[in-house]
Amino acid sequence: MPRDPAAIARDAEVAFVGRVVSRVPADYARSPRCPSISNGGRGLPCGGKIATLEVLTPLRGAVAGRVTVLAGDGCLCLGSYLEPGERYLVVATVNTKGFGADLLAEDVCRGTMEAAAPEAAAIIDLLRRSP
């Protein structure tokens, strides 16, 4: 279950609504108990991934055009699946972990989720109204 929408909006470093253009596996795990390619990820959507997204609606931070997002496992560790062609609310930080991605996506509890999810509307509204 996601955190309180107001807390997500308040704490977001970068946020946008985007459409996934492509997705590739990445040997990344947010924590040792989450699967990556090397420690038991069964392939996408499980395990780490890098997705390229077309930014549709920037909400926080300097994002435009296309960005790459590093995301954790979507099966056991609440990462987003980031399915190609689908729209997502992405809440992220600037990536300092490597892997060639611009941003590091937060998990579902911290705001990255399908844009059509009922919880996303409140977060998007709060982000639009905040600086």
Image (tube, grey):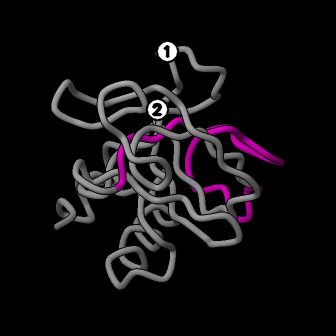
Q: Using a 10 Å C-alpha cutoff, classify the residue at mark 1 as few (fewer than 14 neighbours), some (14 to 19) or many (20 or more).
A: few
- Residue 50 percent location from the top left of the image: 60, 39
Per the image, label 1 sits on a secondary structure element best described as loop
- Residue 35 percent location from the top left of the image: 29, 37
Q: Residue furthest right?
A: 65
Q: Residue at x 52, y 50 (%)?
A: 15
Q: Residue at x 34, y 29 (%)?
A: 29
- Between the residue at mark 2 and the residue at mark 1, the CA separation in whole angstroms equals 9 Å
Q: Is residue 92 left or right of residue 20?
A: left
Q: Amino acid at mark 2?
A: Thr
Whether residues under marks 2 and 1 lie with C-beta atoms below 8 angstroms apart, the answer is: yes
According to the image, label 1 marks what residue?
96
Q: Which mark is residue 39?
A: none
Per the image, label 2 sits on a secondary structure element best described as strand
In front of the other: 14 or 53? 53
Residue 62 part of the magenta segment: yes
Q: Is residue 104 left or right of residue 75?
A: right
Q: Main secondary structure of the magenta part?
A: strand
- Residue 39 percent location from the top left of the image: 30, 27
Mark nearest the camera among 2 and 1 is: 1
According to the image, label 2 marks what residue?
93
In the picture, the quarter occupied by the N terminus is bottom left
- Residue 112 percent location from the top left of the image: 41, 56
Highlighted range, magenta: 54-74
Residue 64 part of the magenta segment: yes
The answer to which quarter of the image holds residue 24 is top right
Q: Residue at x 73, y 52 (%)?
A: 22
Q: Using a 10 Å C-alpha cutoff, classify the residue at mark 2 as few (fewer than 14 neighbours), some (14 to 19) or many (20 or more).
A: some
